[in-house]
Image (cartoon, rainbow, N blue to C red):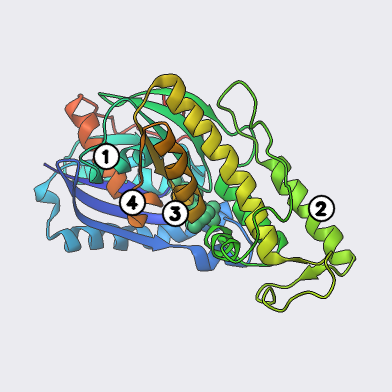
């Protein structure tokens, strides 16, 4: 059973065809990074306009690559929540028109549910219940995932999302957008213990996160070091600073990353211990982070749990995860009317 999945929730125009919830026949993504780069973050209005330009082509390309026509499809699924409202509306309008024209059932899907489902598409050994950490530019959510796609939300961020903080810190350091991979790469050449950035909410008795304090702390540190002429530019770390008070961009990147990863890992492990889950999944763009993957693996091994993450094209925003979870929801009887609307918020349960 083949489903077309569409996602335009943020800055990627994505469409995919997936058979039986797991067999990815095509997964096409048009990235808008170049458009938003000069602003150091996603500009919602520009995102909507770019989606309008790309959506028809991306959908038809996803069908061509999957070697199917609309006649071969059983349903059309689209992310209708949460996300940037203008961006979501483009995907929803396209999906509704196509469902109407081709007389196909329509399913509105929660974007975060798609991210959570991504691991299930590729890991046969994944068991339930498991703990899923969704970390992206827009989300930081810790969820207990049960059989039948039932969720218990354990906690989330109270302010910035993890990826958002990476992007903002990269902006302060003049490193470009998106900042996650750039900081991840620089951090590998720096000392994670060089600067002790705060770990907000690490020891609170819950599963909540707060990242804006880390961000502000890095910002003040960078400004102070810059004013004092103590900041060593990126790529200069090998040139041994003559002054022991000097700090390299690599050290700041590594120390910042250590703070973010510490909190994410600590609370994920705490959740696994409390629930007895034997598997922890990572998903969302920040799941690509090398330190997060490595630290979580070490900590999980200590409590006898497995760590899973999807390949990069299923980690970041894509249509395949939407078509995948839609298949499961279709089996459960989900059908939406053509009055389906987009909404910027939308909780999992
Ligand atoms: O899932 P995604 O593609 O889009 C959203 O739904 O936001 O995630 C993008 C986010 C960006 O904030 C980006 O900086 C971050 O994922 N990211 C990373 C890495 N690669 C991408 N963050 C940390 N380390 C990485 N290696
Ligand atoms: Zn996402």
Q: Which mark is residue 120?
A: 1
* One can see residue 219 in this view: yes
Circle 2 SS class: helix
Q: Which mark is residue 269?
A: none
Residue named by callout 4: 314
Circle 3 SS class: helix
Q: Nearer the viewer, residue 17 or 161?
A: 161
From the top left corner, tell me how far across and down residue 133 is, in percent. Answer: 45, 37
Q: Residue at x 24, y 29 (%)?
A: 335
Residue 69 located left or right of residue 49: left
> Could you tell which of marks 3 and 1 lies nearer the N-terminus?
1
Residue named by callout 2: 220
Q: Is mark 3 within 8 Å of ligand 1?
A: yes
Q: Nearer the viewer, residue 265 or 244?
A: 244
Q: CA distance from mark 3 to mark 4?
A: 11 Å
> Could you tell which of marks 3 and 4 lies nearer the N-terminus?
3
> Could you tell which of marks 2 and 4 lies nearer the N-terminus?
2
Viewer-nearest of labels 3 and 4? 3
Q: Do callouts 2 and 4 mark residues in contact (Cβ within 8 Å)?
A: no
Q: Nearer the viewer, residue 296 or 139?
A: 296
Q: CA distance from mark 3 to mark 1?
A: 17 Å
Q: Residue at x 26, y 24 (%)?
A: 147
Q: Do callouts 2 and 1 mark residues in contact (Cβ within 8 Å)?
A: no
Residue 54 located left or right of residue 4: right
Q: Quadrant of the C terminus?
A: top left
Q: CA distance from mark 3 to mark 2?
A: 27 Å
From the top left corner, tell me how far across and down residue 8 is, in percent. Answer: 41, 50
Circle 4 SS class: helix
Q: CA distance from mark 2 to mark 1?
A: 41 Å
> Could you tell which of marks 3 and 2 lies nearer the N-terminus?
2
Q: Is mark 4 within 8 Å of ligand 1?
A: no
């Amino acid at each position: 059973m083949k489903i077309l999945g569409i996602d335009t929730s943020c800055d990627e125009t994505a469409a995919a065809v997936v058979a039986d919830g797991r067999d990815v026949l095509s997964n096409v993504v048009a990235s808008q990074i170049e458009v938003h780069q000069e602003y150091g973050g996603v500009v919602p209005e520009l995102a909507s306009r770019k989606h309008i330009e790309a959506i028809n082509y991306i959908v038809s390309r996803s069908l061509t690559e999957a070697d199917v026509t609309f006649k071969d499809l059983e349903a059309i699924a689209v992310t209708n929540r949460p996300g940037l409202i203008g961006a979501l509306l483009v995907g929803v309008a396209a999906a509704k028109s196509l469902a109407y024209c081709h007389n196909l059932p329509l399913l509105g899907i929660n974007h975060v549910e798609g991210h959570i489902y991504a691991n299930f598409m590729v890991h046969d050994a994944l068991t339930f219940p498991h703990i899923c950490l969704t970390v992206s530019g827009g989300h930081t959510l810790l969820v207990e995932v049960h059989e039948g796609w039932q969720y218990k939300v354990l906690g989330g961020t109270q302010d910035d999302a993890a990826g958002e903080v990476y992007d903002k810190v990269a902006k302060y350091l003049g490193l470009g957008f998106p900042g996650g991979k750039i900081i991840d790469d620089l951090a590998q050449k720096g000392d994670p213990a060089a600067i002790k950035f705060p770990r907000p909410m690490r020891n609170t008795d819950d599963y909540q996160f707060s990242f804006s304090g880390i961000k502000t702390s890095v910002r003040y540190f960078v400004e102070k070091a810059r004013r004092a002429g103590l900041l060593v530019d990126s790529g200069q770390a090998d040139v041994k600073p003559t002054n022991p008070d000097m700090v390299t961009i690599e050290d700041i990147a590594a120390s910042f990353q250590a703070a973010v990863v510490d909190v994410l890992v600590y609370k994920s492990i705490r959740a696994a211990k409390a629930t007895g889950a034997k598997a922890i999944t990572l998903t969302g763009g920040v799941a690509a982070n090398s330190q997060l993957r490595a630290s979580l693996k070490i900590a999980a091994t200590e409590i006898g749990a497995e760590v899973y993450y999807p390949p990069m094209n299923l980690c970041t925003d894509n249509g395949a995860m939407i078509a995948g979870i839609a298949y499961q929801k279709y089996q459960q009887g989900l059908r939406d009317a053509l009055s389906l609307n987009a909404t910027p918020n939308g909780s999992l349960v």
